[in-house]
Image (cartoon, rainbow, N blue to C red):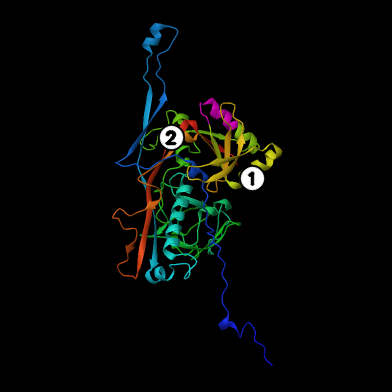
């Protein structure tokens, strides 16, 4: 006797589905981006941000000397220009029709792809807010074996900047140089695997297959097309080394590197809690009124553990209705400083910011659908499908660089 079993009954069995929403496993929380003030009507050719960085000098206990030594106030203006970022997706026509309605699919293909493109652009912008504008999102470790197809990142925490399907290029310079190429063709490779714990990337080709310009240890990694074209974030406004005479948005910052280029302090030789307090005291001395510190999650966890029972938590609400939980640090100058974790923050830096000095200036929302012609989707000329175009035109501006501090914590 042969019993009816799961194999022989396969043709009559239904697939059981739940009503649970499909969960997106991409990164969606970006506190610094959410909290940064925004201006969405950045039109015209450029946008100047004037700053007074020196009071008039003509003071002395002697009237004659005061009169002889008069000096005018010091003014500069950072002249912002916009950076661009694009995200595109194509959706097959039959797939669009076949996924309409709950009876046909878990999620409509068109909605899913548009949402995904917006997430990709938001992640790109949120990461750029912490960086220099060079476009680098990671660095190849010295232990990388370039005869394989696997990259070991110098910092495993940088794995949050990478996604499957990204096309990467490499350069020996973190901006200001060139992308490695074989003649006129850039040496590019696609990410086909990521270990987010170990901080490794599996690439579509071996890293020694590019000829004389193979990728190498200490090279910086970029999404293809990003090199030196991203918005200029914290790393650019408050560089690790005091700025020189090189122009930054038209300004020579070398005459007063703190007021024009922010504060910087090495606190890597002390516990994180003490380093944050020391940074706050320096900021207070320089007239700043810090509102936030931003750390990555690993360092936020270290701070939380070091504070133990002394930890004071606070919920931070944003205009978008998103809430983040932070830790408060006492500030003798004003309100307590809120420490927040952001996955895009660098592993070796704590950013102490007076948030009312920062703004994201954009031409329309950032990101947005690029539908200037009124079409939300475009019919593809040679395919049965449509293309969705999203992007933004934006730049980061700071009207008081000297009211912000970067702390080297490692």
For image coordinates 41% across by 54% down, the residue present is 179
* Magenta stretch, main secondary structure class: helix
**Quarter of the image holding residue 51?**
top left
Which marked residue is nearer to the observer: mark 2 or mark 1? 1
Residue matched to label 2: 244
| Residue 53 quadrant | top left
Q: Residue at x 40, y 17 (%)?
A: 57
> Where does the N terminus fall, quadrant-wise?
bottom right
Depth order, front residue of 177/9? 9
Label 2 Cα crowd, 10 Å radius (few <14 / some 14-19 / many 20+): some
Q: Does residue 281 show up magenta in the picture?
A: yes
Viewer-nearest residue: 326 or 50: 326
Q: Nearer the viewer, residue 164 or 11?
A: 11
| Part of the protein shown in magenta | 278-289
Mark number, residue 175: none
Q: For mark 1, what is the residue?
A: 301
Q: Residue furthest right?
A: 309
On screen, residue 292 versus residue 303, left or right, reads left
Q: Residue furthest bottom?
A: 1
Q: Is residue 183 visible?
A: no
The secondary structure type at the circle numbered 2 is loop
Earlier in the chain: of badge 2 and badge 1, it is 2
Cα distance in 3D space between marks 2 and 1? 35 Å
What percent of the width, then of the height, locates residue 17?
56, 70
| Mark 1 crowdedness (10 Å alpha carbons): few <14, some 14-19, many ≥20 | few
Residue 299 percent across, percent down from the top left: 61, 44
């Amino acid at each position: 006797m042969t019993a009816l079993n799961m194999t022989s009954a396969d043709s009559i069995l239904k697939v059981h589905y739940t009503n649970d929403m499909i969960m997106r496993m991409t990164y969606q929380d970006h506190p610094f981006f959410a909290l940064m003030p925004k201006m969405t009507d950045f039109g015209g050719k450029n946008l100047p941000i004037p700053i007074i960085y020196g009071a008039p000098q003509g003071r002395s206990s002697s009237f004659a000397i005061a009169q002889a030594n008069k000096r005018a106030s010091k003014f500069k203006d950072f002249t912002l220009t916009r950076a661009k970022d694009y995200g595109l997706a194509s959706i097959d026509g039959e797939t669009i029709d076949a996924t309409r309605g709950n009876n046909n699919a878990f999620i409509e293909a068109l909605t899913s792809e548009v949402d995904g493109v917006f997430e990709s652009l938001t992640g790109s912008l949120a990461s750029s807010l912490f960086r220099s504008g060079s476009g680098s999102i990671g660095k190849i470790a010295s232990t990388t074996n370039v005869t394989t197809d696997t990259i070991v990142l110098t910092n495993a925490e940088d794995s949050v900047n990478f996604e499957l399907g990204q096309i990467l290029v490499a350069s020996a310079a973190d901006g200001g140089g060139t992308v490695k190429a074989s003649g006129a063709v850039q040496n590019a490779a696609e990410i086909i695997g990521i270990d987010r714990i170990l901080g490794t990337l599996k690439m579509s080709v071996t890293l020694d297959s590019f000829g004389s310009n193979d990728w190498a240890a200490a090279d910086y990694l970029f999404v293809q097309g990003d090199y030196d074209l991203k918005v200029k974030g914290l790393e650019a406004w408050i560089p690790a080394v005091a700025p020189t005479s090189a122009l930054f948005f038209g300004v020579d910052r070398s005459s007063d590197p703190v007021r024009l280029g922010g504060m910087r302090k090495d606190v890597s030789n002390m516990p994180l809690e003490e380093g944050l307090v020391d940074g706050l005291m320096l900021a207070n001395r320089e007239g700043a009124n810090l509102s936030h510190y931003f750390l990555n999650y690993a360092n936020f966890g270290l701070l939380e553990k070091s504070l133990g029972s002394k930890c004071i938590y606070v919920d931070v609400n944003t205009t978008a209705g998103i809430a983040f939980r932070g830790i408060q640090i006492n500030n003798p100058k004003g309100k307590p400083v809120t420490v927040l974790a952001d996955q895009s923050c660098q592993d070796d830096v704590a950013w102490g910011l007076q948030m009312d000095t920062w703004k994201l200036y954009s031409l329309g929302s950032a990101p947005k659908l690029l539908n200037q012609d009124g079409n939300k989707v475009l019919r593809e000329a040679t395919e049965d499908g449509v293309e969705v175009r999203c992007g933004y035109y934006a730049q980061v501006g700071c009207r008081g660089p000297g009211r912000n501090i970067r702390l080297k914590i490692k």
